[in-house]
Image (tube, grey):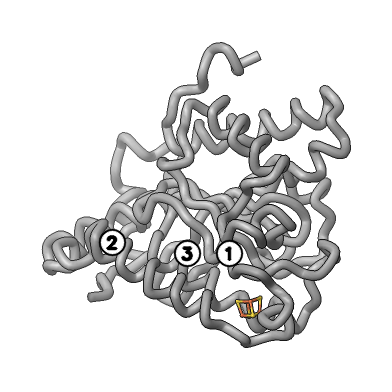
Amino acid sequence: MEASFSICSVAQRLLKSPAMEEKPDITKAVRQHAQIDEFFTGGFAVRGEDKAAGELEKLADEVRQCRGCPLGSVRTNAVPGEGNPNARIMFVGEAPGADEDAQGRPFVGRAGQLLDKVIAACGLKRSDIFIGNILKCRPPENRDPRPDEIISCLPYLQRQIEIIDPEVIVALGAHAARTLLDTNKSIGQLRGQFHEYYAGLGRPPIKLMATYHTAYLLRNYSPDNRRKVWEDMKKVLAELNLPIPKQAAH
Ligand code: SF4
């Protein structure tokens, strides 16, 4: 059941609240209001973790059967994505590579191992988050995704985001960031600040942080690039009120 709420009424209430007079966060307030609404209208009980997990698995089965673009006939395995159905953070990459194609799982090659390190540095585990890609099947020779492939495949990711409803999306690399934000800006221009991803009418926007893809980081493993990724992730942790681990805080 969709919770009904009014952005204006929430904003008005916030502006009247002395505790929030300085800098009201409308996105957070709308999300909290929707959750309260959902609880009192009974939606909370039917949209629990089990239901989200079931919906994600059904969607993953659809992806595994999909022949919606030419990549469906050249893949070994589709890679629907995996992780916590109630994740607060969702990582979105570009497309599966050779290792992912062979195993049917996202981010399991060298770039995936580096992503594991980034996740661990944040004090998190893979089971805390959800990882997916813009394309669910590997483009031959790891070439860039083509516009027609993105148009065919994007609805799967959009439905995953809708089901998981994360608080923050981390877009890994230019293709993920540009696709989700519908922009042609470079990753250098997009990273380092929060953007808003719109999941649909009646839904509050989701905060999106763009950062370098770990495959790019592997190819350009400089202290400066590593620092930039860590700066981006610290902003994500701060947004979620999560502690910044001491060993990685400098
Ligand atoms: S890339 Fe996406 S649209 Fe194309 S076949 Fe795979 S799942 Fe279907």
Q: Secondary structure under badge 1?
A: loop
Q: Is residue 238 above or below residue 164?
A: above
Q: Is residue 179 above or below residue 173?
A: below
Please give the residue where the numbered disc 3 appears in the rendered image. Answer: 161
Q: Is 169 left or right of 134, judged from the image as shown?
A: left
Please give the residue where the numbered disc 1 appears in the rendered image. Answer: 79
Name the amino acid, label 3: Ile
Q: Residue at x 82, y 62 (%)?
A: 142
Percent position (x, y) of residue 24? 42, 44
Q: Residue at x 30, y 37 (%)?
A: 18
Residue 85 location, quadrant: bottom left
Name the amino acid, label 1: Val
Q: Is 182 left or right of 52, judged from the image as shown?
A: right
Percent position (x, y) of residue 168? 50, 49
In the rendered structure, which disc, 2 or 3, sits on the residue that comes first in sequence? Answer: 2
Q: Residue at x 76, y 28 (%)?
A: 226
Q: Give whichever of 171, 195 is nearer the camera.
A: 171
State the mark number for residue 102.
none
Percent position (x, y) of residue 45? 14, 62
Q: Give whichever of 7, 71 is nearer the camera.
A: 71
Q: Rounded to the nearest whole Å, what is the CA distance between mark 2 and mark 3?
A: 17 Å
Q: Is residue 31 above or below residue 249?
A: below
Q: Give whichever of 174, 190 is nearer the camera.
A: 174
Q: Rounded to the nearest whole Å, what is the CA distance between mark 2 and mark 1?
A: 32 Å
Please give the residue where the numbered disc 2 appears in the rendered image. Answer: 34
Dot 3: within a 10 Å radius of its alpha carbon, few (fewer than 14), some, or many (20 or more) residues? Answer: many
- Between disc 2 and disc 1, the foreground one is 1
Percent position (x, y) of residue 76? 66, 69
Q: Secondary structure under badge 2?
A: helix
Q: Quadrant of the C terminus?
A: top right
